[in-house]
Image: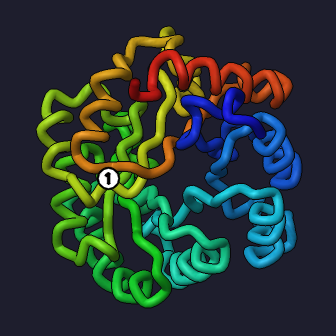
């Protein structure tokens, strides 16, 4: 990699979901060839690669860093605590200090939203010390309210911080994901409040019209309505200096050759996200 090819993308990371069809080996090779230094890995891809130790070797031998592990959480489902303990161990073995949490929606057959949020709080209380022992930080990701019932009863950055602030900062932080938080009138105040609690910054755009499966409504940065420069400046002003992950759920992107996707990621990062 040369300085000219990596200029402006020193903090850019590929979240594996963006190139869903690629194996971990293919994603690592693509990033190395494109000059992208970070990769956010998913647990199923890690398992396919032979487990966390083998995956870590694959990533590090290519000169890359694991920016995060996706995902833990789903605390409102049976067996969540043990599964998250395993996820913490996997994150440590991969050499990342960030385990992204999608906290879970309403339990099956339940309408008890308050109770579900209490389950999330209690699970964090049980897992935070274990994460700290492994040098891993639990990163609570608020999801857009349309996912409250099935994916995350934590919907705003303020809610995520209310949870995180009950624990040491090195044990529990928050994720700022542009797709999920851009709409929030309290966003910039909460980013400032978050400060050192920001464990991950993930980016993609909100595009219209939304598809039938709203989960797949993410677009490349610059293709939608989110104003990225002020958002990135706010995250930087809060003190965040870590990786900036591009995480896309989009069938058209998944159908595009991965090399072209990485090329567009780089172009859009330089144009809209990288601070000058």
* Residue 259 seen from this side: yes
Residue 95, quarter of the rendered image: bottom right
Label 1 crowd bin: few (<14), some (14–19), many (20+), radius 10 Å:
many
Indicate whether 205 appears above or below 175. above
Say which of 79 and 38 sits in front. Answer: 38
Q: Nearer the viewer, residue 65 or 207?
A: 65
Q: Is residue 113 rendered to the left or right of residue 127?
A: left
- For residue 50, above or below residue 248: below
In the picture, which quadrant includes the C terminus? top left
Residue under the image location 20 percent in, 35 percent down: 187
Q: What residue is shown with label 1?
A: 153
Give residue 91's position: percent from left, percent from top. Answer: 59, 73
Instruction: Answer with left or right where residue 76 lies relative to residue 124.
Output: right
Q: What residue is drawn where x is 23% and y is 40%?
A: 237
Quadrant the N terminus occupies: top right
Tell me residue 257's x, y (percent): 85, 25
The kind of secondary structure element at disc 1 is loop
Query: Residue 267 occupies which quadrant of the picture?
Result: top right
Residue 223 percent coordinates (x, y)? 53, 11
Query: Furthest-front residue in view?
Result: 3
Q: Is residue 106 visible?
A: no
- Asked if 48 appears above or below 133 in the picture, the reply is above
Residue 15's place in the image compared with 71, above or below, is above
Quarter holding residue 58 = bottom right
Q: Residue at x 60, y 43 (%)?
A: 13
Image position of 58 (left or right of 211):
right
């Amino acid at each position: 990699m040369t300085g000219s090819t990596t200029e402006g993308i020193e903090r850019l990371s590929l979240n594996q979901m963006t190139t869903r069809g690629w194996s971990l080996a293919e994603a690592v090779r693509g990033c190395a060839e494109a000059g992208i230094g970070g990769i956010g890995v998913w647990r199923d891809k890690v398992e396919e690669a032979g487990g966390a130790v083998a995956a870590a070797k694959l990533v590090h031998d290519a000169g890359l860093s694991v920016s995060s592990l996706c995902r833990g959480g789903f605390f409102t489902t049976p067996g969540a605590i043990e599964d998250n303990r395993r996820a913490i161990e996997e994150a440590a073995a991969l050499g990342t200090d960030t385990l992204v949490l999608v906290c879970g929606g309403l339990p099956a057959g339940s309408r008890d939203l308050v109770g579900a949020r209490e389950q999330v709080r209690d699970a964090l209380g049980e897992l935070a010390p274990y994460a700290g022992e492994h040098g891993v930080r639990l990163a609570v990701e608020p999801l857009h309210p349309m996912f409250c019932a099935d994916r995350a009863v934590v919907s705003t950055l303020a809610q995520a911080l209310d949870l995180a602030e009950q624990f040491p900062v090195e044990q529990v932080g928050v994720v700022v994901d542009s797709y999920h938080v851009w709409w929030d009138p309290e966003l910039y105040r909460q980013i400032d409040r978050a400060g050192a609690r920001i464990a991950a910054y993930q980016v993609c755009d909100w595009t219209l019209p939304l598809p039938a499966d709203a989960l797949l409504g993410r677009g490349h940065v610059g293709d939608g309505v989110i104003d990225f420069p002020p958002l990135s400046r706010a995250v930087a002003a809060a003190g965040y200096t870590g990786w900036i992950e591009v995480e896309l759920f989009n069938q058209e992107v998944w159908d595009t050759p991965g090399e072209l996707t990485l090329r567009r990621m780089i172009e859009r990062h330089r144009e809209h996200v990288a601070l000058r």
